[in-house]
């Protein structure tokens, strides 16, 4: 990864936008500090069935990650996250609301140097 994309390693919104910019399909998402923007995003999108992921933009692991089944749950998750201190000890500046993607989830750990790429681990999430 180019050094200028280092921030995308922890910034979840930027991770997805970087993937999208490379021409790969990515989840619908919004990063917002105001509930009204989230509400309008969901109303315009109208997910059916209603399954929305709400989480801090920059945190770690499953810290305050919510799978919401309706607008009320989404608002409660947003209020819980926005402005709170996350597991990294930082204040959440905005909340990431994303499309829920069905299916298996994998993590691929890799390293690259001078154009040489090595996969060092592949993990299947057991959720």
Image: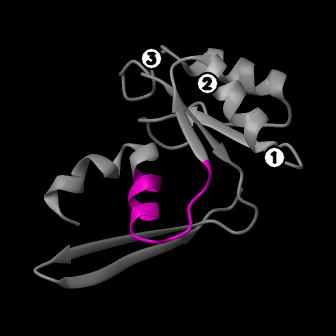
Q: Secondary structure at mark 3?
A: loop
Which quadrant is home to the N terminus? bottom left
Give me the residue at 38% from left, 43% from top.
11
Q: Is residue 32 visible?
A: yes
Would you call the spot at circle 1 few (<14 residues within 10 Å), some (14-19), or many (20 or more)? few
**Residues at discs 3 and 2 in contact (Cβ within 8 Å):** no
In space, the residues marked 1 and 3 are separated at their CA atoms by 29 Å
Q: Secondary structure at mark 1?
A: loop
Marking on residue 37: 2
Give me the residue at 89% from left, 49% from top.
49
Give me the residue at 74% from left, 38% from top.
44
In space, the residues marked 3 and 2 are separated at their CA atoms by 22 Å
Would you call the spot at circle 2 few (<14 residues within 10 Å), some (14-19), or many (20 or more)? few
Residue 92: quarter of image: top left
Stretch of the chain drawn in magenta? 15-28
As drawn, the residue found furthest toward the left would be: 114
- Give how far across and how far down residue 106 sits, in percent: 57, 68
Which of discs 1 and 3 lies nearer the camera? The answer is: 1
Would you call the spot at circle 3 few (<14 residues within 10 Å), some (14-19), or many (20 or more)? some
Q: Is residue 65 left or right of residue 1?
A: right
Asked whether 84 or 24 is in front, the reply is 24
Marking on residue 47: 1
Which quadrant is home to the C terminus? bottom right
Asked whether 16 or 123 is in front, the reply is 16
Among the two numbered marks 2 and 1 on one chain, the one whose residue lies closer to the N terminus: 2
Vertical placement of residue 39 versus 68, above or below? above
Q: Is residue 16 magenta?
A: yes
Q: Is residue 67 visible?
A: no
Asked whether 90 or 49 is in front, the reply is 49
Residue 59: quarter of image: top left
**Which residue lies under the disc numbered 3?**
85
């Amino acid at each position: 990864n180019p050094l200028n994309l280092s921030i995308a390693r922890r910034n979840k919104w930027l991770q997805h936008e970087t993937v999208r910019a490379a021409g790969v399909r990515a989840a619908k998402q919004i990063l917002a500090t105001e509930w009204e923007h989230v509400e309008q995003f969901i109303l315009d999108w109208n997910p059916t069935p209603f399954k929305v992921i709400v989480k801090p933009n920059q945190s770690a692991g499953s810290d305050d990650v919510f799978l919401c089944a309706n607008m009320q749950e989404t608002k409660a998750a947003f209020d819980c996250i926005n402005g709170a201190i996350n597991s990294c000890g930082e204040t959440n500046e905005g909340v990431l609301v994303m499309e829920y993607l069905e299916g298996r989830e994998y993590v691929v750990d890799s390293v690259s140097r001078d154009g040489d790429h090595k996969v060092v681990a592949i993990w299947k999430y057991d959720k």
